[in-house]
Amino acid sequence: MSFRFPDEFLWGGATAANQIEGAHNADGKGLSTSDVQPFGSFGELKQRQAGDFNLKDTAIDFYHRYPDDIALFAELGFTCFRLSIAWSRIFPKGDELVPNELGLAYYDKIFDELEKHGIVPLVTLSHYEMPLYLAQQYQGWKSRELIGFFERYARVVFSRYGNRVKQWLTFNEINISLHEPFTGAGIPRGSDSQSLYQGMHHQLVASAKAVKACHELIPDAKIGNMMLGAIQYPLTPDPDDVLAALQENRDWLFFGDVQCRGYYPSYMTRKFKEIGVSLDISEADKEALKETVDFISFSYYMTGCISVNNKSMQMTDEKMLAMGKNPYLETTDWGWQIDPKGLRIVLNFLYDRYQKPLFIVENGLGAVDQVNEQGEIEDDYRIAYLNDHLYQVGEALQDGVEVMGYTSWGPIDLVSASTAQMSKRYGFIYVDRDDNGQGSLARKRKKSFYWYQSVIKSQGENLRAPAES
Ligand code: BGP
């Protein structure tokens, strides 16, 4: 690619506490919602019992191995690392008044280490977990009280780390709770739309309050929202399909609209009426929502199709997030449709809609890797996937879209969120651990490690045009 990404473009990788740290009950940490999801975010919930097995209890032991892992990120050339703080390390139950000092001290060490290597942290306040106690005692975000608990937590971490952390995100994939309410919001599964949207409203208010607190406490910081950016295309030009795709996309854009514009979009008034939802929105809530995010972040893995009348439309072979099949696209081994150009489309689409800087904070290929006889991992498929997506980011930059950076998902192998597997690997760095928890946890550079290193070094100049163009 003759194009060079801007000098200030941030390159890195993204993770979440519960998928890498392990040490699930160390140093005063409380149980989190993730600790009762041993089968992943869409799997059955299981109350903790002595001696039971949960891959995430140790995960990849980042809790203890972070100095070596961060050194590897530095070797890759990362200028940015996305991680999340486990809320239950800071407030083990969630409704305490005083934070857990040992939990706070742990993240001090992480930020020190990143600083040592000149890597800028991008921190998610809540990535698919919260103190379990809040889910059990308050039914999670269904309760308005969580707004105050979350604001207290946010203020504590902003005050503590504000001198070193200048980039923040509020809730990971906030829109996913409409599909799976327990994982991100601790709301009981099977709750009706009224409870779901009320819970989402509480989260949106809490997100805005965190934005306000961040602006107050760290004036030179930027804080963004985070959405799962899976755009839906109409399967055919039938206006019914086009309208259905518009409406389907509004299910996730609704969150962005509130977080970027500061008020509910008018199309939700009709929708709420039609589905019989009547929200409790106070004047104070409306005022709070006016504090909008500085930038928009999103994850990008796949796109889907929508059709109303076309009976021949098939669904992807994905148990959790099945989408309408697009005849032009291939899928990953986990049934996610691979659509590099869709990333350029989403970037342009969001920029046209909001005119705010965008940050791609997740993208990557979950695949089974084989260690060959020479002990190497030749993950050319991952290189191809990432090359094609990053190439489209370059195209979007040339379209004039403001893109702050790109953090690929899981730069080091980690436990998958949806299926809680180690075998669904995303990393440039291999971790010797299998789905049963067997393995030495040793780290090893894959072929993609050297590839990503060279992409960062060349500021994207060595990305190759996709084969078909
Ligand atoms: C996103 C989540 C991540 C992550 C990723 C990949 O939805 O924010 O936590 O895990 O998807 O999904 P999976 O791990 O299920 O392959």
Image (cartoon, rainbow, N blue to C red):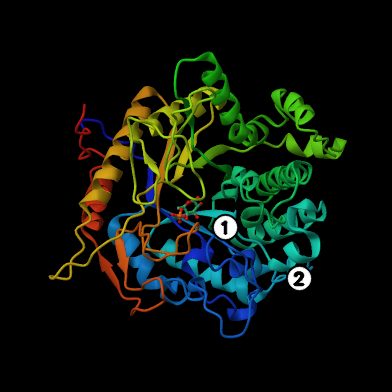
Q: Which residue is drawn at 74% across and 50% down?
A: 191
Numbered tag placed on residue 98 in the rendering:
2
| Residue 111 visible in the picture | no
Q: Which residue is drawn at 49% across and 30% down?
A: 232
Residue 152 vs residue 335, the one in the foreground: 335
Q: Position of residue 19 (x, y in %)?
A: 49, 64
Secondary structure beneath label 1: loop
Residue designated by label 1:
163
Q: Position of residue 417 (x, y in %)?
A: 50, 58
Q: Which residue is drawn at 78% across and 46% down?
A: 195
Say if 112 sits above or below 295 in the image: below
- CA separation in Å, label 2 and label 1: 21 Å
Disc 2 residue type (three-letter): Val
Secondary structure beneath label 2: loop
Q: Earlier in the sequence, mark 2 or mark 1?
A: 2
Q: In this view, does 50 lie to the left or right of 385?
A: right
Numbered tag placed on residue 377 in the rendering:
none
Residue 416 vs residue 162, the one in the foreground: 416
Q: Which residue is drawn at 74% across and 57% down?
A: 140
The quadrant of the rendering that contains the C terminus is top left
Q: In this view, does 29 lie to the left or right of 417?
A: right
Say if 32 sits above or below 257 in the image: below
Q: Is residue 248 left or right of residue 410?
A: right
In this view, the residue farthest toward the left is 374
Q: Where is residue 118 in the image (x, y as percent from the top left)?
A: 39, 58
How many callouts does the rendering have? Answer: 2
Q: How crowded is mark 2: few (under 14 residues within 10 Å), some or many (20 or more)?
A: few
Disc 1 residue type (three-letter): Asn
